[in-house]
Amino acid sequence: MVQRERLLFKYYFVLIIAIVTTSCNNKIKDDGVVPSSFVVSTAGIPNDTLLVTNPNVTLRNGVYYWQGKAYSGYLKEMYSAEKVKCIFSFLNGKQQGLSLVYFQNGKLKNSRNYKEGRSFGRHYGYWENGNQKFDFIYVNDRREGVQKQWYESGGRYSFLAFKNDREHGMQYAWRENGKPYINYEAKEGRRYGLQKSNLCYTLQNQKIKLSSK
């Protein structure tokens, strides 16, 4: 069982790297500085795997410990004895590499990447129907480049550009019927263009609908 989980983890690691290195097929320009590689080294992480419910696993000041020592290995949480809910990799007590979360049906819910405990690189999320939910970019916990979100139906929700965790460049958002309701440029703390609403809700057939993020 443990060997199967490790192989599954490695499979998704290879899959995410393949996605990262494949250019996105869209016409929205990615503004902001994005590093050329998001690969995070997992060298030095042993194959040890523990349950997050293990009484000897503790969290102090953002660092995970096992039996009093900073933990290197994998932590997992289970839906049941046979169903994995999530699995995270750690190096010296901090998240390093991929953190994977699954739906109860076994499909991938989200994949997030970490470097020395901080968000780094591409973060992907999916709706339970398999459609993509989000594609975020982080550099040392800061948003960088275009942060993309989609509706559960598969339609675009928002493509927001960031530089050093601040809006920078063109910002786009769409109603669920596909019509744009945000289209502006952010530059030096100012916005220029269409700003019909904040992103606290979405509009479906011209009616307010609670946002499903």
Image (cartoon, rainbow, N blue to C red):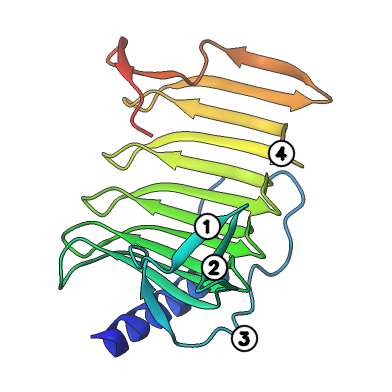
x and y percent of residue 178 in the render? Answer: 37, 28
Q: Which residue is mark 3?
A: 43
Q: Quadrant of residue 86?
A: bottom left
Q: Is residue 182 above or below residue 164?
A: above
Q: Residue at x 48, y 61 (%)?
A: 58
| Disc 1 secondary structure class | strand
Q: Nearer the viewer, mark 1 or mark 3?
A: 1
Identify the residue under disc 2: 65
Q: Quadrant of the C terminus?
A: top left
Q: Secondary structure at mark 4?
A: loop
Read off the residue under disc 4: 165
Residue drawn at 38 percent across, 23 percent down: 175
Amino acid type at circle 2 is Tyr
- Across and down, in percent, residue 165 comes to 71, 38
**Residue 80 in the image: x percent, y percent?**
15, 65
N-terminal-most mark, 1 or 3: 3
Q: Which numbered disc flags the more N-terminal residue, 4 or 3?
A: 3
Residue 59, label in figure: 1
Residue at 35% x, 38% y is 155
CB under 8 Å between discs 1 and 4: no
Alpha carbon separation for disc pair 1 and 2: 6 Å
Residue contact at pointers 1 and 2, CB within 8 angstroms:
yes
Q: In this view of the protein, which residue sits in the foreground, 185 or 53?
A: 53
Residue visible at 55% across and 74% down in the picture? 71
Which quadrant holds residue 142? top right
- Mark linked to residue 6: none
